[in-house]
Amino acid sequence: MAAEELRDILRQVQQGQLALEAAERALQDLWRTDLGFARIDHHREARKGFPEVIYCAGKQLADIREIFSRLARRGRNVLATRADADIYQAVAADWPDARFHARCRAITLDQEHRAPDPHVPILVVCAGTSDIPVAEEAAVTARIMGHHVEEIYDVGVAGIHRLLEHQDRLRAAAVVVVVAGMEGALASVVGGLVSAPVIAVPTSIGYGANFAGLAALLGMLNSCSSGVAVVNIDNGFGAGYTAGLIVGRILSAKNRTGF
């Protein structure tokens, strides 16, 4: 629910252009849309700083298309995760400016065209090429939230010199998202190099004893590096969203103080 939409309704009531009953209905539509199969939370943006995100897995194609359209009509940015090409084709029929990020299976619609602040970067680092889909989900999420995102890929601990070449970029980041499978050691290494918060994302990439990401998850949870927080296995979205919230708070404080 955007503040300007609320003010517009109140202004119309004040000026006698909108009856109280009509205003009540408009206010109800502002904070939620009940489609029966989904109750879209339009108040999410006011509470969280970004509109509700569509998780596509398990949803009917027609339902996704309708939810996407209801969100898009408000003129805000839209993000759908765990999508596929068929879902994208259905969405793009209504919203041709929507973009499909095939590698991470996400759909974005950028209607606000925010100018990101390059001085408060989110850095997404991943251990191996196989981890890139999860890393890109984090990067796409943070970008559609309006933030400046940089990536460093394939810098796992098996060739740690590749990571150490980027120490300046690591230390300049406001938040670092570290994506790794196998034993998940990269998060601890990065955590020991930077003062910024590190959001670790274990992936399901690895051989049998990786247990579909469980080994990396436990390794990250047991990190001896301070300032490392961990999200769920393959949850690039959760990491990117959390990084976006952190940077959003930094930018808000920066705008208030002028520093």
Image (cartoon, helix red, strand yellow):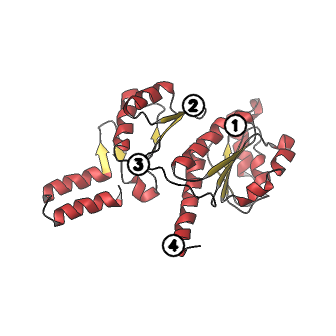
Distance from Cα at disc 1 to Cα at disc 2: 14 Å
Mark 4 is on which residue type? Arg
Quadrant, the C terminus: bottom right
Distance from Cα at disc 3 to Cα at disc 4: 24 Å
Q: Residue 49 in the image: x percent, y percent? A: 46, 57
- State whether residue 97 is above or below residue 23: above
The residue tagged 2 is 102
Whichever of callouts 3 and 1 sits on the residue coming sooner in the sequence is 3
Query: SS for tag 4?
Result: helix
Distance from Cα at disc 3 to Cα at disc 1: 30 Å
Quadrant, the N terminus: bottom left
Whichever of callouts 4 and 1 sits on the residue coming sooner in the sequence is 1
Whichever of callouts 3 and 4 sits on the residue coming sooner in the sequence is 3
Q: Which mark is residue 76?
A: 3
Query: SS for tag 1?
Result: helix
Q: Residues within 10 Å of mark 4 (few under 14, many from 20)?
A: few
Mark 3 is on which residue type? Arg
Residue 121 image-quadrant placement: bottom right
Residue at (46% x, 36% y) in the render: 98
